Structure formats: C-alpha cells, structure tokens
Amino acid sequence: MTDFSLSLPDKHLKMKAVFAETPSNMIIGALFLLLLAAGIFWWANNLARSAYTDYQIQRGPHHIVPGADIDGKCEAHAYILTICDTKIRTDSQTLDKHFAFFDLSFDDYSVYAIAPDNSSDQITLSLAADKAINRLIFALCVAGVGLVCISFAFYRAFIDRSRISALLRGLNRADAQPWQLTTIDAFVDDDKIKHYMVDIHGTERKITFSFGKKMEPWLLDVSGDTARLLAFAPADGGAAVPFDRKLKTIGGLNKSERQALIAELERISGQ
C-alpha cells in the first residue's frame, strides 16, 4: 500500500458505491433473483404436475386413442436433454403437449396417443408417460436452479451488501474526512480485475468488483495476478475503497472540483 499527497475540497465527501455496487442495487438485484426463482418454481411445479398426471395414466387402465393425429418433434439439446413440442388432434379436441426428459441413448421412439379408460378426454403421449419418472427428475433439477437463485439472492442481500455497506460507512464517517489517497492490491484473472481482500471488523473479506458501463478503475500497474489500484482510505485509518476514473462514485463534488481532482489524479498516476 502506498500513500500519496492529495488536496481534496474542504467539504464532506461521500463514497456512494464500490464501482457499480451500491447497497440499494444489491437489494434490487436480490429481489429480481427472488422473482426469477418464483417463476422457476412455477415452471417446475407445472412440469411435475404434468409428469405425475401422465404417470397415473400409465399406471392405471388406459387405451390407445384411435384415429389420433400426432404432429411435432423432439430435439436433443446439449447431448443430455430431449425437448418435445407436439400437438395431438382427435375428432373431439386438439391439445398441445410439451415435455422434456434426460436422454443419452439417442434412440428412436414409437409414439402414440393414450388416455385412461375412465376419461377419454385426458389424452397424453405414450412417450411422455413412459418418461414420467425421468420428467419428475428434470422438474426437481429445475427446482434446484430456483433454490440456487434464492441462495444467491440471500447472499447478495445479506453478505455482499453488508460488506459493501460496512466499507462505505467506514469511509463516510465525519472522522474519516479528509480521505487519504492510497493504493490497494486487486486480484487479476484472465486479464480482468476481479476482487480485492479487505479487513472488515477484524476479518479479511473478499470484495468482488462489478464495473458499470464505461466504468474503469484507476489502474497504476499490473504484476502477474496482482493489479495496483488507487483508493481512498479514512483519515483515521481503516479499509480503503477504490473508485472509478470519472469519480462517478464520489458524491459532494461540483463539476469544476471533479475536473480538478481528475487532473490531479492523472498527474499523480502518470496517466
């Protein structure tokens, strides 16, 4: 870590974000993930209900529907999943039948329409009924994706957000002014700046970077998998927070102050 001499405006400045990450947009992102999870669970429920209905038809007395016309296709995806989109036409009705199942055999299947003996209107395909257990497993996998979304939403809302909030609170305290210009070491992977480690309440935590549109850090140099970035630290000591080249994440600056500070940072960084 290197400290630099920098004159900041004699006013209270506020760090609003760690690049594109703010506590509020983390909550919004978490809510979006929860809505996505709800949609996934709704889909998984429909998949499971349809598979279970077909399973009951196959297990009970049933018959082949005479004169049923079957149109559509089944396609393999990613060498493991087969998705079928079909239409069944009889003299009395037309219905769409969509289902998916895991399949590694690439076999051809004979498909015909079947219905339970006690309800000729409840029509399905023989293939859909034969693969009912397989389809239930697929529905469980889909539900698992929903659980992953929920887990990530809670991690974003309660873990990531608390870390970002702690960093911003520490830097935005009255006692932390005026900030001290310093550097942080960030981890680089595949030519991208990924995260940095910082002490929060006595424990080292990882802060993952999310750069907004056209947002760039003040990059001093890169050595192997380590990048050195400019950052502001509290005057009385504490965790440093990096900032973007246009100072979008810093509140309290007017246009002329922002331009002057950018020019001074360019001089210090040699950029």
Image: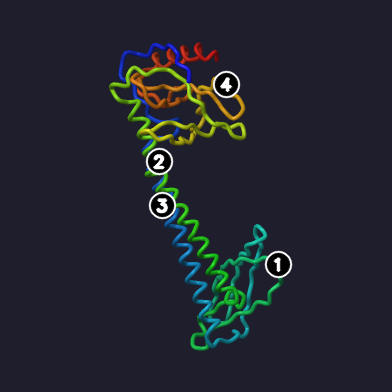
**Circles 4, 2 touching at the beta carbon (< 8 Å):** no
Q: Identify the amino acid type marked 4.
A: Asp
Q: Which residue is mark 3?
A: 34
Task: For marks 3 and 2, give the CA distance.
Answer: 12 Å
Q: How dense is the environment of label 3, judged by Cα within 10 Å: few (below 14), some, or many (20 and up)? A: many
* Residue 51 locus on image (x, y percent): 52, 72
Q: Which residue is mark 1?
A: 106
The one of 237 and 31 positioned closer to us in this rendering: 237
Which is nearer the N-term, disc 3 or disc 2? 2
Q: Residue at x 46, y 12 (%)?
A: 264
Q: Which quadrant does the C terminus fall into?
A: top right
Tag 1 secondary structure = loop
Q: Residue at x 49, y 59 (%)?
A: 144
Where 2 falls versus 90 (above or below)? above
Which is nearer the N-term, disc 3 or disc 4? 3
Which is nearer the N-term, disc 2 or disc 1? 2
Horizontally, is 38 left or right of 64 in the view?
Answer: left
Q: Which residue is mark 4?
A: 221
Q: Identify the amino acid type marked 3.
A: Leu
Q: Which numbered mark, 3 or 4, is in the foreground of this view?
A: 4
Where 200 falls versus 269 (above or below)? below
Q: Identify the amino acid type marked 1.
A: Phe
Q: Which residue is mark 2?
A: 26
Q: How dense is the environment of label 2, judged by Cα within 10 Å: few (below 14), some, or many (20 and up)? A: many
